[in-house]
Image (spheres, coloured by chain):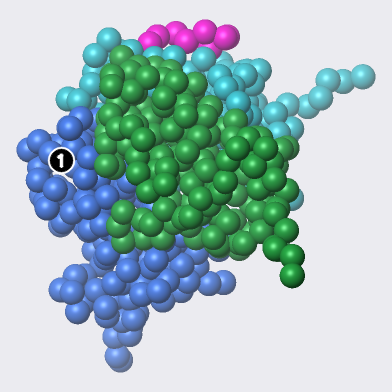
Chain colours: A green, B blue, C cyan
């Protein structure tokens, strides 16, 4: 009669006041994530929150770095949702291997690492030691739907 | 005496009026694709058609989104060629795992997903269910040789 | 009583007058490289030399393509350092699988391949046949700390 127990990962997110959302439907002809062997590759995740983008534009322009960091966290939460949709139990994640953060930037903005920390820090809090990853952060000229940030991740999962 | 039978993948491409081209020689010090274990990683593919780029410039500027989509299809076809050159029989592809589409964009253009659909849809038609992939699409400020689109893929292949 | 013997990779670098540097500490909440199975994924490496960036700005603007190529070599050397810090002996690298080179570019600059060759050529010289890789080179609008180039690599290592 009891509900499905929450994964430890989701418990840690709940302590942060966060819930793993429904998977964001792809904007186009692909899927949110693919599993191959013991790896899950997510698609680039936009910072959709409850079906809407809280802000649009370029970081360093209409979007502040602080807003960008919050949006990067939303991207990471959507990436976690995409992984969960494939593997069910997030405690099966044994390692977040790689994160790429694309930050829509004005040419003068060079604080991409601080923005993408919004994603990295959430992954660290959610997965603990398993959340420590390699990462690239770059400034791109534009993103789909005028999103300020897009984040993709690769995770290793247990058999 | 008979010719080598065409792979099912190439038969599906032929129905679309498409032929897997010769591999596009790299612009620089690398190779078109590398196999490691059961995976093939391609280099970023430019939209060369018969040795020439049909259009150059930024999408949203000199290049329309519709042209960009056609060019993304050309990139994907070149990626398929790069995979074929390594594994021979394209029917050995068990999954297209990941696609990254880089769209040279003016800052105001945010329709990268529709452009990269040119690649995603071709992969779906060529590989069927095995062609359904995770994907990132981003807008970059410039690409090699002033290409409007560059596409890289990772595929899983049978032993 | 003898010192630890130098790896063949480091001997080849020494012939070029290069030493594998100390690992560059991440700018943010992540690690320089992660090993998963037989693969090492590095974080995006900036062209730090002895703790400082020799030049900043966009290639095609304040930074010439020739400078960009030298900086790309510095990125690759830092990537090699990140791999070494994880696996110890660089001769365990059996293949450089993939390189992505992000070149901070003015919109008119389309010579990203020549810039990223600075990384590709170094990997070829350091690892020989094992250094021949798949590669993407793209022009981005801005990079962390105003770096002109950022390079990430994936390598396969022996058990």
Establish if C119 lies above or below B74. above
Q: Image quarter for residue C3?
A: top right
Q: Residue furthest right?
A: C1
Residue A86 in the image: x percent, y percent? 55, 62
Q: What residue is shown at x 52% (from left), y 29% (from top)?
A: A118
Tally of marks: 1
Report whether C29 appears left or right of A6.
left
Secondary structure, magenta segment, majority class: loop
Quarter holding residue B124: bottom left
Query: Which residue carries the number 1 mark?
Result: B59
C74 w.r.t. B88: above or below: above
**C24 horizontally vs C58: left or right:** right
View extreme (left): residue: B62
Quadrant of the snapshot with the C terminus of chain B: bottom right
Nearer to me, C132 or C51: C51
- Residue drawn where x is 37% and y is 48% of the image: A51
Judged from the image, the secondary structure of the residue bearing numbered disc 1 is loop
Foreground pick, A46 / B105: A46
Range drawn in magenta: C49-56
- Return the residue found at the far bottom: B1
| In the foreground, B58 or A115 | A115
- In the depicted structure, whether residue C65 falls above or below residue A131: above
Q: Is residue C43 magenta?
A: no
- Chain letter of disc 1 in the image: B
The quarter of the image holding the N terminus of chain B is bottom left
- Please provide percent x and percent y for residue B21: 24, 63
Relative to A114, residue A141 above or below = below
Work out whether residue C138 can be spotted: no
User: Residue at coordinates 58% horizontally, 56% vertically from top-left?
Assistant: A84
Q: Position of residue B83 (x, y in %)?
A: 39, 62
Please state the horizontal and vertical placement of residue B92, each as a whole percent of the image.
Answer: 46, 74
């Amino acid at each position: 009669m009891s509900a499905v127990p929450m994964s430890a990962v989701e418990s840690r997110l709940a302590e942060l006041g966060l819930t793993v959302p429904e998977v964001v439907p792809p904007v186009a002809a692909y899927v949110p994530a693919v599993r191959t062997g013991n790896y899950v590759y997510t698609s680039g995740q936009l910072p959709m929150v409850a079906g809407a983008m809280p802000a649009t534009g370029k970081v360093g322009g209409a979007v502040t770095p602080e807003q960008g960091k919050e949006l990067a966290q939303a991207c990471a939460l959507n990436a976690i949702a995409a992984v969960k949709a494939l593997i069910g139990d997030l405690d099966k994640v044994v390692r977040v291997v790689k994160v790429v953060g694309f930050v829509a930037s004005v040419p003068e903005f060079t604080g991409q690492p601080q923005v993408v920390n919004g994603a990295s820090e959430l992954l660290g809090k959610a997965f603990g030691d398993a959340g420590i990853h390699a990462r690239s952060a770059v400034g791109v000229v534009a993103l789909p739907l005028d999103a300020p940030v897009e984040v993709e991740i690769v995770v290793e999962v247990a058999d």
